[in-house]
Structure formats: C-alpha cells, structure tokens
Amino acid sequence: MTISEHKRRVLSKLGFTKKGGGKHEKWRLMDASTGRPILTTGVSRSNEDVGHGLLKKYRTQLGGITKDQYNEIASCNMSKAEYIEWLFEKGVISH
C-alpha cells in the first residue's frame, strides 16, 4: 500500500470527505452543525511513496497529531469520535 492509499484510508475513517483538486485531492473534515470545513489536507494523486518531511506536514494538517497517534488511527484503534474529542481537547476546534 502506498502512502497516498494509506492516507485516504485514514482520512475516510476520520470522517473527511474528498473534493476534487488539481495535482492533489482535497480532503475536508466538515463541521456537522455549520457545514464549514474544520480541517483541510491534500493527498497526492501519485502512487509514489513520500518522505518523512511530507508525512510530518500531513500530521500537522490533521491537527498536530504525533506519529504514534497517526499509527493508532491507521491501525483502527482511534475512532472518529475520539479524534474529534482530541481536536476539542487540543483546542484545534471549539464547541
């Protein structure tokens, strides 16, 4: 599985939706009450693996999650509800 495929799987699990884009797919986590985007990130349409620096930028776009938290999400140990609650606790989003 490429990094891009892995990212798509994680984003879908967390409730992000895909929107078209140019060189990259745009993925947004939407606020259910307002319909406005909370977080936005991109995924390369390329099937090539990407380096550590780009993965770090991607984790930052997901609210500053750590590598361990990303791995926890990817291994299905963190649910969408837990992720949203974590974003509230960290102050990335507010009630």
Image (cartoon, rainbow, N blue to C red):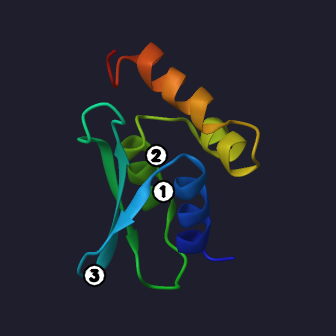
Residue 35 point in image, percent of width and height: 26, 41
Question: What secondary structure is found at the residue carrying circle 2?
Answer: helix
Report which residue position mark 2 lands on. Answer: 59
- Name which residue lies at 71% across and 40% down: 72
Report which residue position mark 1 lands on. Answer: 55
Q: Is residue 60 left or right of residue 78?
A: left
Q: Quadrant of the N terminus?
A: bottom right
Instruction: Determine which of the numbered discs, if any, sits on residue 39 in the image.
Output: none
Viewer-proximal residue among 71 and 14: 14
Q: Are marks 3 and 2 in contact (CB under 8 Å)?
A: no
The amino acid type of the residue labelled 2 equals: Arg
Residue 39, quarter of the rendered image: top left
The amino acid type of the residue labelled 1 equals: Leu
- Estimate the spatial distance between the alpha carbons at disc 3 and disc 1, rounded to whole Å: 17 Å
Q: Counting residues from the N terminus, which is met first, the one under dot 3 or under dot 1? A: 3
Report which residue position mark 3 lands on. Answer: 23
Residue 19 point in image, percent of width and height: 32, 68
The amino acid type of the residue labelled 3 equals: Lys
